[in-house]
Amino acid sequence: PGLFSAGADAIDYEPGTLALADLPGRWRAAKASYDAAARPGQRLPAVYASASSLTPVANEFVAAGIGAGPRLWVAHWDLPVADAVSMLVNSGGPYPVIGVQVHNAGLYDVSLFRADWLDTVSRAPAVPQPVLHAVLAEHAVMVTSADGGKTWR
């Protein structure tokens, strides 16, 4: 059950989505996708879970040997916004909170996120630049191209 893409920004852990034991493997797959920039623009993987699930989620990561790294997006409906902001600003440790969902507005939910998490994204690998060789011979300059003659300078 549950939808999962290794290129997702967050893994949804709530009733009916996936087993707790599957969470570390899914996080590792998402982290590998982020590290490889398989989907440029992907954020460091987070786990979306209710506030009441945070202890079992953290314990599952520890049991799987993941002592740090996963980010947490916490569903804590009707938490006062000031408390949600405090949670985001003061979060640290091995599993920092990067988002707090504070309200269900019917057709959509309202969440607050850390700007540093939103801004830190995977990047496509740099495109290798052609290597050019210049040879001086008396009064002439010969320029060669490393890409089979597609570009010359």
Image: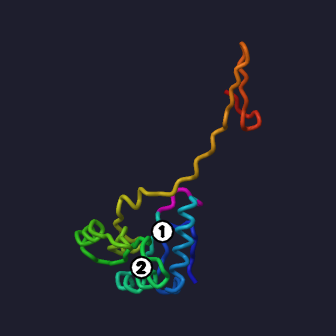
Can you identify the residue that label 2 sits on? 49
Residue 68 or residue 77, whichever sits in front: 68
Which amino acid lies under the numbered mark 1 shown in the image of this protein? Pro
Q: Is residue 42 left or right of residue 50?
A: right
What number of labels is visible?
A: 2
The residue type indicated by label 2 comes to: Ala
Residue 142 in the image: state x and y as whole percent: 73, 23
Position of the C terminus, as image quadrant, is top right
Q: Is residue 39 within the magenta segment? A: yes
Q: From the top left corner, tell me how far across and down residue 135 is, in percent.
A: 71, 24
Q: Position of residue 72 (x, y in %)?
A: 40, 73
Residue with the mark numbered 1 = 45
Q: Please, is residue 59 above or below residue 3 in the view?
A: below
- Packing grade of label 2 (10 A; few <14, some 14-19, many >=20) is many
The reply to whether the magenta stretch includes residue 148 is no
**Is 86 situated above or below 142?**
below
Dividing the picture into quadrants, the one containing residue 61 is bottom left
Q: Secondary structure at mark 2?
A: strand
Give the residue at x 42% y 73%.
68
Q: Is residue 42 above or below residue 86?
A: above
Q: In the rendering, at what x and y percent does residue 58 appear?
A: 41, 81
Residue 95 sits in quarter: bottom left
Q: Residue at x 41, y 59 (%)?
A: 118
Image quadrant of residue 90?
A: bottom left
Q: Main secondary structure of the magenta part?
A: loop
Seen at 54% across and 83% down, the residue is: 22
From which residue to which does the magenta span run?
38-43
Q: Residues under labels 1 and 2: Cα distance? A: 13 Å
- 22 left or right, relative to 69: right
